[in-house]
Image: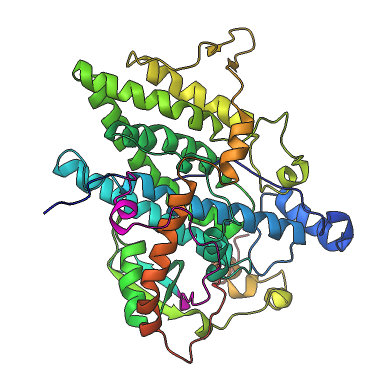
């Protein structure tokens, strides 16, 4: 599902200037020509590091993102919706598997990634630190969070790292069902009884803030990412993706006569850009660093799954087996 | 019988299993996710098998089960191969030049052989 915007941190080591300049030139020429970089190709240390971070965050987001929706499987209204939600949650976990494999090709073993998630070292998309309070929340997540994810992932699938692009192509095809399913659920509630309308409006009110946070901090306060853009690791600016999302989905929300809880939201007809209340980036930072409504329980559940599955993994393990980095 | 019905969280696992409010943030030492397999699938009978990705499994039998779930749950697929990643031999990146050959290869292409001129001249030597 979830690209979750770009959260890059500057690293102290591995600046491109310290790389072999000849190799760096070939590498950049290849990317400029639209060629993909494969795991066995030479790449700058910084490229490897930032890609591992990004793909790993993406994988964690898929697996943690399955939790708020997963809790609604037993309470889904009706058999068809239950089947659809189970399929969606299974897809998300499958996406995590594809993404972990892509990140592994860069040299970080999966065990290390899971451990970094459990110990709070790795991040995942901030939106999953908020609860899905009612059934309508799952509808809004499946429609609008997945819509945001598609915008992010379609952009990333044109990036430079082969294994990540291939995983994303497969993921994007599956996401289109999630989006349609989510839209169907929102439309059903929004065109239903006054009580159902109230329910979906409440959910939208709760989720608008995380949705605006979804693409990451405004370009004005983001870490410089020119190099990452040139290397096609980052494919679009956070604000550009947010604009694209608003362009595509605000009219669809308004046509259902739902209101968006931001009095300043409007499209500037001269510039063609959306204007909105600047999201609270302090809250974003606070929540992503562990202090959100659900951070602790998400990690507790993830840890429990690993601990409870451990005896099964060990029972099936062969003593002579050796971990090998996947090929592509 | 009295039961405690207090809902601590919307996640039933939290409420039912009374997971700690502050999870232990120590790394898990026993983590082991097996070895990796490369997966090839055949979309329809008669097609070549195509590499679609990799997965972790303890043995080939489990790898097939997981591959079916991961790569064949949505779209048409009639057959799957799994191969241990460690069993795959490949040419090195640094050896890419072994694929460089002479650029002129007409001698090994059908279009490199034109005989009609000679045949026509043979049949009718007076005609140009």
State the residue at coordinates (31%, 51%): B15
Q: Which picture quadrant has residue A318?
A: bottom left
A127 sits left or right of A78 in the view = right
Q: Is residue B110 above or below residue A195?
A: below
Residue B35 within the segment the image draws in magenta: yes
A48 sits left or right of A314 in the view = right
Q: Furthest-left residue in view? A: B1
Q: Is residue B79 above or below residue B61?
A: above
A182 sits left or right of A107 in the view = left
Q: Position of residue A93 (x, y in %)?
A: 39, 56
Quarter of the figure that contains the C terminus of chain A: bottom right
Q: Is residue A144 above or below residue A294?
A: above
A122 sits left or right of A226 in the view = left
Q: Which secondary structure class fits the magenta region best?
A: loop
Q: Is residue B124 visible?
A: no
Q: Nearer the viewer, residue B66 or B7?
A: B7
> Magenta segment, which residues?
B8-37
Q: Is residue A133 visible?
A: yes
Q: Which picture quadrant has residue A308?
A: bottom left
Residue B59 within the segment the image draws in magenta: no
Q: Position of residue A194 (x, y in %)?
A: 21, 16
């Amino acid at each position: 599902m979830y690209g979750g915007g770009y959260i890059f941190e500057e690293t102290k080591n591995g600046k491109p200037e310290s790389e072999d300049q000849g190799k760096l030139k070939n590498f950049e020429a290849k990317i400029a020509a639209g060629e993909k970089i494969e795991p066995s190709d030479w790449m700058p240390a910084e490229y490897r590091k930032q890609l591992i971070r990004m793909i790993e965050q993406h994988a964690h987001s898929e697996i943690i993102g399955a939790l708020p929706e997963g809790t609604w499987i037993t309470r889904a209204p009706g058999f068809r919706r239950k089947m659809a939600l189970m399929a969606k949650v299974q897809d998300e976990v499958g996406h995590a598997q594809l993404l972990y494999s892509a990140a592994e090709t860069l040299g970080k073993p999966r065990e290390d990634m899971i451990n970094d998630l459990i110990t709070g070292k790795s991040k995942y998309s901030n939106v999953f630190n908020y609860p899905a309070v009612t059934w309508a929340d799952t509808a809004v997540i499946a429609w609008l969070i997945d819509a945001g994810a598609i915008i992010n992932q379609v952009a990333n699938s044109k990036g430079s790292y082969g294994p990540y692009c291939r995983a994303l192509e497969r993921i994007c095809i599956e996401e289109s069902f999630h989006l349609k399913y989510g839209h169907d659920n929102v439309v059903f509630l929004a065109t239903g009884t006054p009580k159902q309308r109230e329910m979906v409006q409440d959910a939208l009110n709760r989720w608008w803030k995380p949705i605006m946070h979804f693409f990451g901090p405004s370009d004005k306060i983001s870490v410089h990412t020119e190099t990452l853009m040139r290397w096609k690791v980052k494919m679009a600016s956070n604000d550009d993706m947010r604009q694209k999302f608003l362009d595509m989905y605000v009219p669809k929300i308004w046509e259902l006569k739902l209101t968006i809880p931001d009095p300043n939201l409007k499209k500037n007809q001269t510039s063609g850009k959306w204007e909105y209340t600047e999201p609270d980036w302090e809250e974003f930072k606070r929540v992503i660093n562990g202090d959100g409504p659900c951070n602790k329980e998400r990690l507790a559940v993830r840890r429990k799954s690993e601990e409870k599955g451990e005896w099964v993994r060990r029972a099936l393990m062969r003593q002579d087996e050796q971990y090998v980095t996947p090929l592509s | 019988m009295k039961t405690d019905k207090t809902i601590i969280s919307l996640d039933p696992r939290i409420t039912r299993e009374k997971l700690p409010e502050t999870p232990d943030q120590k790394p898990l030492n026993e983590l082991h996710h097996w070895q990796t397999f490369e997966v090839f699938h055949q979309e329809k009978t008669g097609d070549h098998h195509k590499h679609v990705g990799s997965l972790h499994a303890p043995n080939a039998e489990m790898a097939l089960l997981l591959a079916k779930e991961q790569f064949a749950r949505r779209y048409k697929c009639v057959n799957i191969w799994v191969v241990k990643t460690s069993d795959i031999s490949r040419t090195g990146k640094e050896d890419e030049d072994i694929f460089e050959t002479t650029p002129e290869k007409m001698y090994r292409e059908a279009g490199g052989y034109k005989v009609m001129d000679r045949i026509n001249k043979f049949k009718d030597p007076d005609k140009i």
